[in-house]
Image: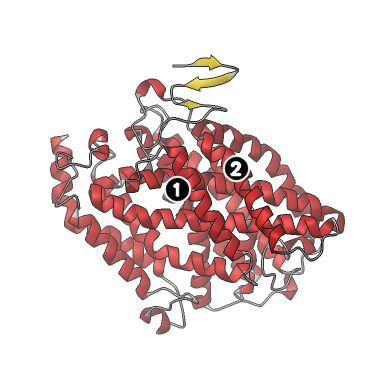
Amino acid sequence: MTASIEGASVRGGDAFGAIETHGIDLISSEERHGKPTDLFWMWMGSNLNIFYPVNGALLIFFGLSFGQAILCALIGNLIFFGVGLTSLQGPKTGTSTFTISRAAYGPNGGRSFSIFNWITCVGFEASGIALMVLAGLALLHEAGVHNPGTAIKVVLLLVAMVVQSFLPVLGHETIMRVQRYLSYLLVPLFIIMAIMVVGKVQVGSISHGSGWAMFMVALALVISGGGLSWANTGSDYSRYLPADASPKKIFWSASMGGMIPAVLLEILGAAIASIVKNASDPISGLPSALPGWVVVPYLIMAILTLLGANTTNLYSSGLTLQAIGLKLKRWHCVLVDLVIATTIGGITIFSSNFNHLYSNFLSLLIAFLAPWLGVYGVDWLMRRGTYDAASLLNTTKTSRYWGSGGFNLAGVIAQIAGMAAACLWLSSPAFVGPLSSRTQGSDFSFFMGIIVGGLVYFVLARTKVRGEVNEA
């Protein structure tokens, strides 16, 4: 169903330039549109952002050699295959990722764990808004305003909030199209930035390398700061695709759209770290590696990349609020999230070390997302990709996925077991697990979480899931 209203392409409730009317409700077959390659450009636009050079620089600050940093980026970003995996269910069901996860956890269990996902999204949103304000302050510095007061910072926060609101409020079709255009703009800009940096790189000034324990800590950071933190949103963007869209094309488009920019930008960030020592954030630190006349264009580019990444997070966090059970329209949920994220971002900008707070955040979110991905992936495999879409939206006892009191105990137990296992081998400034402390501070939290979570779920749920599949 395609029509035209004042030049906007309208497909049911998903229109470019108009507010999307759908939330987690099922997208009908008549309203399905697009093709799998659209996901490549959407994820490319979302991941062409300055968080990845920050991650790459952090690898060097952790003591890795340049070669180790490259290896870490290559291995760690394989997790983007998780984004491809969680994009496969959207076309089959027509709803969002955390609504689909109710099949594994039950309606009430899914709502409960959606809260953790919402916190994850808001954390990234707050980080992005904080960096936008820091970029705005840096632009004012270039204009001669060297000591901005609290009032100016508050004004910049409000401006960032208003500007950031447009795309996620408008919704899916607008986001998909704008992220494609953003990719076209940002790819050449990052290439130019890399060319300017390469002549200054001093690989010899970087540490000769770290041991295996620190390498695993760095690997955990790359995993949590990249594909793992997007895997929880995969079907949010694929749910409008036709049900018969090629799973292979969906998987590769979503995976490679995020993986390619993440790897390349983290390697660039590692190279920049050989020039910039101990930068406290990517706004005040990374531009010093560039010629002076590039600082203002760089800051503008940084704001654009942050808008792109935050748009994706805000859209998904709005859907997650609906999955939790908030009885608001999708775009109302986006505005609620934006106010909360702006408040947290405002607190963050008064911190003296953004990188420290950001790395702590990344190290802790892995404890939830790793077992969740394990449970979600195993559930999908056991169901052979088949779901009762209506039951995913049914939160009463008549739902196929009701379980006991609205909880699928197998999923809940597996998630908790996976989180506990991840914490046992977690190495973070905020928390060091007992297995980590006994192994030179190493971090195997991702592997512990995803393996234990997935395995426990398989053992506990295989009979129940087999029965649900046979009934379908």
At label 2, counting other C-alpha atoms closer than 10 Å, the crowd grade (few under 14, some 14-19, many 20 or more) is many
Q: Residue at x 67, y 70 (%)?
A: 280
- 246 vs 181, nearest the viewer: 181
Q: Residue at x 52, y 49 (%)?
A: 338
Instruction: Give the labeled residue for mark 1.
Output: 317
At label 1, counting other C-alpha atoms closer than 10 Å, the crowd grade (few under 14, some 14-19, many 20 or more) is many
User: Does residue 40 appear to the left or right of 146 in the view shown?
Assistant: left
Q: Residue 285 location, x and y as percent?
A: 73, 66
Q: Residue 427 location, x and y as percent?
A: 45, 75
Q: What SS does tag 2 mark?
A: helix
User: For residue 115, which quarter of the picture?
Assistant: bottom left
- 75 vs 398, nearest the viewer: 398
Q: How is the image coloured?
A: secondary structure
Instruction: Give the labeled residue for mark 2.
Output: 45
Q: Is residue 107 visible?
A: yes
Q: Is residue 37 above or below residue 65?
A: above
Question: How far separated are the C-alphas under marks 1 and 2?
Answer: 18 Å
Q: Quadrant of the C terminus?
A: top left
Q: Which residue type carries mark 2?
A: Gly
Q: Which residue type carries mark 1?
A: Ser
Q: Is residue 81 above or below residue 267?
A: above
Q: Is residue 280 above or below residue 92?
A: below
Q: Is residue 132 visible?
A: no
Q: Residue at x 79, y 56 (%)?
A: 140
Q: In terms of sequence position, does the residue under pointer 1 or pointer 2 come before the other? A: 2
Q: Residue 5 location, x and y as percent?
A: 55, 16
- 112 vs 219, nearest the viewer: 112
User: For residue 270, which quarter of the picture?
Assistant: bottom right
Q: Quadrant of the N terminus?
A: top left
Q: What SS does tag 1 mark?
A: helix
User: For residue 434, which quarter of the picture?
Assistant: bottom left
